[in-house]
Amino acid sequence: MEILNSIWLFIQDQILGMKWLNDLTGKVLSQAGLNLNGRLGGSIHFFVYDVIKITILLCLLIFIISYIQSYFPPERSKKILGRFHGIGANILSALLGTVTPFCSCSSIPLFIGFTSAGLPLGVTFSFLISSPMVDLGSLLLLMSIFGSKIAIAYVIVGLVIAVVGGTLIEKLHMEKYVEEFVKNASHVDISSPSLTSKDRIQFAKEQVMETFKKVFPYILVGVGIGAIIHNWIPQSWIESILGGRNPFGVLMATLIGIPMYADIFGTIPIAEALLAKGALLGTVLAFMMSVTTLSLPSLIMLKKAVKPKLLALFIAICAVGITIVGYTFNIFSTFFMG
């Protein structure tokens, strides 16, 4: 058992966490004359290390996930989902969301396609919630920074919110609040082309380049904000706003996250810095979920596809679910942080 624990710690620290990279960048910057103990030097070290680490993980994970995704194009996903009914369909839809696009805005066109294809509205909303909030890449990236307990718990609660949210929308029969152009959109039910392994590898490479171009600016912004929080903002400020002394910290973190637009890869560096400065775990997770699921640009896009009443219900379900998750994690944070 001790051997297995040692192997897992090595994987988490050196492979996922890339502590060797942290040491290497520190040595290089020190030799360049930078004082890593100073605010500026510490910020530069944080920035360089996190950008390189997240970029390496991002490209590797996108390649692997895109290769898996090549087996689940929209037409095939529609057929798979169409075979299931009730909560089983919501669960499967939420799970399919884990191998699809990395931000909410790119998930909405698939949501529209699934809805126009006649899939139950609750099932498509389970997909819409889980796709930006939870994916295989976020699981491994969260493991690299926060550890396996927090990463697995984050993914599980994200899937629960997606399933419960979709099920609730299904039970309330909100179909009449979908815009007519979505319900009447024509769709072609074609068989997915058979791809060779070479085709799938090429597809994965293209997805890496395309996603990297879209995501990298947000990584730079996210890591930059994280570096400022980590080295320039006093810990007492973070603790007073997002720490245990503020009972409304989770609500504030959820509301702060909505106007922002980033995917999970750009949000994690900010969350990492907030946690290191004394923000509570649940508050940090609520912030991450809010940014990835309820970003303002994605809500504007979704407004084109659904009527205000359904949009308001979607926001309310996600906001309440995220808030409950935040306070629950705060209560049990000692277990997850132990």
Image (spheres, rainbow, N blue to C red):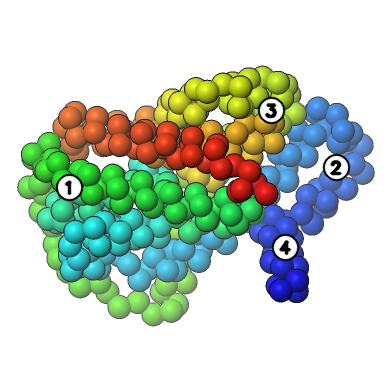
Residue at horizontal 25 percent and vertical 48 percent from the top: 166
**Where residue 11 sits in the image (x, y, percent)?**
69, 65
- Circle 3 sits on which residue? 228
- Horizontal and vertical percent position of residue 311: 23, 33
Return the disc, 1 or 3, that comes first in the chain's sequence.
1
Residue that badge 4 annotates: 9
Helix, strand or loop under label 3: helix
Mark 1: amino acid = Glu
Whole-angstrom CA distance, mark 4 to mark 1, is 43 Å
Residue 178 visible? The answer is yes
Mark 4 or mark 1: name the one nearer the start of the chain: 4
Query: Which three-letter amino acid code belongs to the residue tagged 2?
Result: Leu
**Dot 4 surroundings within 10 Å: few (below 14), some, or many (20 or more)?**
some
Badge 4 amino acid: Leu
Graded by Cα atoms within 10 Å as few (under 14), some (14 to 19) or many (20 or more), the crowding at tag 2 reads some
Q: Name the residue under label 2.
A: 29
Compare marks 2 and 3 and give the one earlier in the sequence: 2
Tell me, yes or no, if residue 107 can be seen here.
no
Write the residue at 78% across / 49% down: 22
Numbered badge on residue 170: 1
Asked if 25 appears above or below 140 in the picture, the reply is above
Question: In this orientation, which residue lies closer to the viewer: 304 or 295?
Answer: 295
Q: Nearer the viewer, mark 1 or mark 2?
A: 1
- Helix, strand or loop under label 2: helix
